[in-house]
Amino acid sequence: MNDKTETTALSSDVTEVRAQKLKLLREQIGDVYPAHFHRTMTNAELAAKYENLELDTETQDVVTVAGRVYSSRNSGMFMDIHDASGKIQIFSHKDTTPEDARALLPMIDIGDIIGVTGVVRRTKRGELTINAQAITMLTKSLLPMPEKWHGLSDIELRYRKRHLDIMTNEESKLRFQQRSKIVSGIRRFMEDDGFMEVETPMLHSVYGGATAEPFKTHHNTLKLDMYLRIAPELYLKRTLVSGLTDKVFEINRNFRNEGVSTRHNPEFTMMECYWAYADYEDIMDLVERLFTKLALSIHGSTEFMFGDKEISFKGPFRRVPMPDAVKEATGIDFLAMKTDEEARAAAKAAGFEVEKDWTWGECLAFVFEEKVEPTLIQPSHVTHFPKDISPFAKEVPGEPRLVERFETYCNTWELGNAFSELNDPEEQRARMVEQLEQAHARGEKSKQLDDEFLDAIDQGMPPAGGLGIGVDRLIMLLTNAPSIRDIILFPARRNKAD
């Protein structure tokens, strides 16, 4: 019999035993899944309150706690129960625990959820303990838990059965607690900085704001094909036009029907904001202040480890124009070239394979991605992107081929993308028409011009700086997670049958 067969047989036996115990419990105590049970404190609150309780000391304080049984020793005389905040030891002995409560002990399995009322004490070994006076069965678990100290070794099973992963893996549990802290920290930072949070639609009749393949659905009542949001940009800019606020942001879910990797998930979280009467340099300062604040909240320092690398979120970050970064890395001076042909020839001469119709800006961006991006370990703002690949940013004064755009990189990853936003309605329309023609040429026949957005811009949008931050990647960095699926509670995955 192989290991897999043995494990399956054991699991089946254990499950049957638990089902039999459930039947007996129903006969003996009635409701095994009661709706009402009130604890007086969490395990963490208990630990804090009695932190200074001396060894081998018993109080007169009676408390009520609840949690899942993680370990049982001496036929249940000693049990450790965990709630979301931590663990507490339960002691059930004939001298302190009534017979009816002790009669439950043989029926309690690892993974069951119980409530306990009793007196608080500190053992001779220093363990904070409750001498049980009453035990209540709150939930009988019909399936065994994974082995506590090893958890789920199968990576795919960890993502599929996240509840078990968190139940048995303190590192996973901590990551998701930190994720919550980071997201709420972003929200507090933005609000404290004067930004107003809004909510924009997730269903779009015209998709835009980014270049990506959308997910398509259908609205039955409106008899209208719609798309899951790929970006909130165009709605947020319309909010800026309205005058509702000069500083707007949204922490939003976006959906892009594209690849899955350690850094990409089809459903992902962004923080996007727009700041009237600001520009991309103001946004750079905002990013640095935000990143510093988040690092301090999670690590208590601006320095932290990601894998074997020490990352510093202490500002100011390095700021380098893309053409300068490429020249430094390769010796190619794109700014000295006047034509697309020169740019393609220079890239080919340096050993890069470029397409025959690529523009000057596309060649520059490609060489940057190949040679510079992999070297950007510490936080860096790469500025002055080619206009060819940045249709919604304002030109750099004196250099019309470049725009006031930056991307923030760290650990070779792009974490944020920002512009001095284009607000010239005629140029905005021209660029969006050009982008639409390119999309149609690529076969994206469903792509449409967003006339409602263009009508809003015609009304007049103030000059503004705009920013989008990939929240998931930022969380990966701050929690030392090697894969985006480690910080998404329930990541996209194939069906089990596949």
Image (cartoon, rainbow, N blue to C red):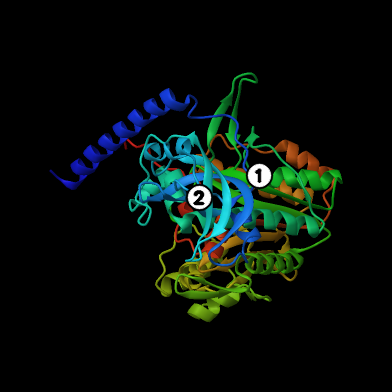
Type of amino acid at the residue the image marks with label 2: His
Of badges 1 and 2, nearer the viewer stands 2
Residue 165: x, y in percent?
43, 49
Label 2 sits on residue: 82
Camera-nearest residue between 353 and 468: 468
Residue 220: x, y in percent?
60, 20
Q: Which residue is found at the position 51% from the left and 65% from the top? A: 126
Q: Which residue is found at the position 61% from the left and 56% from the top? A: 59
Type of amino acid at the residue the image marks with label 1: Val
Q: Which residue is found at the position 37% from the left and 44% from the top? A: 145
Q: Secondary structure at mark 2?
A: strand
User: Distance of mark 1 from mark 2, alpha carbons?
Assistant: 59 Å
Q: Which residue is found at the position 47% from the left and 27% from the top? A: 29
Q: In the displayed structure, does residue 96 sit left or right of residue 193? A: left
Q: Secondary structure at mark 1?
A: helix
Q: Is residue 163 above or below residue 481?
A: above
Label 1 sits on residue: 433
